[in-house]
């Protein structure tokens, strides 16, 4: 089903993890779109949709590890959007149970209740950080597990498992959205994974760095604003284009020195090669905790081409990478 026409009474859309970073970008669009009649927000922790102005949404308590919860919550849904995912903060077994098994439970439950579309928030990390990755990755490039970073490993594994599930359940259209680092006023402490030095700035509250020299490797960094992730997800909800995977990112790609300059510091440009080599070596260290595994993301730039989303979904980012960064730090 690839028509953007809603059912006669409007779409019913179920969303897991509606209060996170991605939900903050999507749910207001669902609320404001006449093609959407009803929204079901599925989360473990209770929240009041009305307090957020989400009058179309009904809260349903549910845990992605419990298929019965999901089937009950999804009953009558035309579209299921899966946003619930752990980035850090749990032991490996719990993380896998929620991220991998929970995603598969969600897909199966969507199929069992007769939903037409399943929309999954994946990540650029699904491509891995491999030396042969091109700069300007297109969707036909293979997704491959990273060497160490658990998050990237799980995203790549899940895309393969969802593709298998889609072949077995062709009546359920599968949409995958692959954003890079997601920024915005709701992002810090949510799904965003900023470079460590940017997190330090954001956590310390000041709006600008002091005008002092800051070492910065000359590496490219793609960003996207949470609202632009929401608009891409919305394009999938209403089937603005065919099922499949879509890369999304802000128009411009920044470099680490440019980011330092935007934050008010004086960048001391360092060559990219040594930074990549150092990151690869650090990622190989045994016993790295989950948070430290993110160093592997610096081992090779993961820069995507977003032509397909523009041409097939009609999606366009509205917030520049520069503005997304500044909103995050200042927010």
Image (tube, helix red, strand yellow):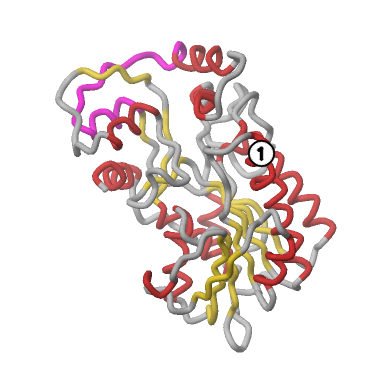
Magenta highlight on residue 266: yes
User: SS class of the residue under badge 1?
Assistant: helix
> Can you name the residue that lies furthest to the front here?
46
Q: Which residue is mark 1?
A: 154
Question: In the figure, 152 relative to 30: above or below?
Answer: above
Residue 257 quadrant: top left
Rendered residue at 43%/38% (across/down)? 222
From the viewer's side, name the closer residue of 232 and 282: 282
Foreground pick, 95 / 302: 95
Q: Is residue 179 left or right of residue 105?
A: left
Quadrant into which the N terminus falls? bottom right
How packed mark 1 is, by other alpha carbons closer than 10 Å (few <14, some 14-19, many 20 or more), is many
Residue at figure coordinates x 54%, y 40% from the top left: 87
Q: Position of residue 173 (x, y in %)?
A: 71, 63
Instruction: Give the total number of marks visible in the rendering.
Output: 1
Question: In this view, which residue lies farthest toward the bottom?
Answer: 8
Q: Is residue 153 visible?
A: yes
Tell me, yes or no, if residue 155 can be seen here: no
Residue at x 25% of width, y 19% of height: 214
The relative height of residue 194 versus residue 308 in the rendered view (above or below) is above
In the displayed structure, does residue 207 sit left or right of residue 219? left
State the image quarter where residue 237 is shown.
Answer: bottom right
Q: Position of residue 330 (x, y in %)?
A: 24, 44
Q: Foreground residue, 286 or 91?
A: 91
Judge whether residue 178 is colored magenta: no
Q: Residue at x 60, y 18 (%)?
A: 287
- The outermost residue toward the left is 211
320 up-or-down from 63: above or below? above
Q: Which residues are magenta?
A: 256-274
Q: Residue 312 appears at what percent x and percent y?
A: 58, 59
Find residue 132 and report its horizontal and vertical position in percent. 62, 24
Give residue 223's quadrant in the image: top left
């Amino acid at each position: 089903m690839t028509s953007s026409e809603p059912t006669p009474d409007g779409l019913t859309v179920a969303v897991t993890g509606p209060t996170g970073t991605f939900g903050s970008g999507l749910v207001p669009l669902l609320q404001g779109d006449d093609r959407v009649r009803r929204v079901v927000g599925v989360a473990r922790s209770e929240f009041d949709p009305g307090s957020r102005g989400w009058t179309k949404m009904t809260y349903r308590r549910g845990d992605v590890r419990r298929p019965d919860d999901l089937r009950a919550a999804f009953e009558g849904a035309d579209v299921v959007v899966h946003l619930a995912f752990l980035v850090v903060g749990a032991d490996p077994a719990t993380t896998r149970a929620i991220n991998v098994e929970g995603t598969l439970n969600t897909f199966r439950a969507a199929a069992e209740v007769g939903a037409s579309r399943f929309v999954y928030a994946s990540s650029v990390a699904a491509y891995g950080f491999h030396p042969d990755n091109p700069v300007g990755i297109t969707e036909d490039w293979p997704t491959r597990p990273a060497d160490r970073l658990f998050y990237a490993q799980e995203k790549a594994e899940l895309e393969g498992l969802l593709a298998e599930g889609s072949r077995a359940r062709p009546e359920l259209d599968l949409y995958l959205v692959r954003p890079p680092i997601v920024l915005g006023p709701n992002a810090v402490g949510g799904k965003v994974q900023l470079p460590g030095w940017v997190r330090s700035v954001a956590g310390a509250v000041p709006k600008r760095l002091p005008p002092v020299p800051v070492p910065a490797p000359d590496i490219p960094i793609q960003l996207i604003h949470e609202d632009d992730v929401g608009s891409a997800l919305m394009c999938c909800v209403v089937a603005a284009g065919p099922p499949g995977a879509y890369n999304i990112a802000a128009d411009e790609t920044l470099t680490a020195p440019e980011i330092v300059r935007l934050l008010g510091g004086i960048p001391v440009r360092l060559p990219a090669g040594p930074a990549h080599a150092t990151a690869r070596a650090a990622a190989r260290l045994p016993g790295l905790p989950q948070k430290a595994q993110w160093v592997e993301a610096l081992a090779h730039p993961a820069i995507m081409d977003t032509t397909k989303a523009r041409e097939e979904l009609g999606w366009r980012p509205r917030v520049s990478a520069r503005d997304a960064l500044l909103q995050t730090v200042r927010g």
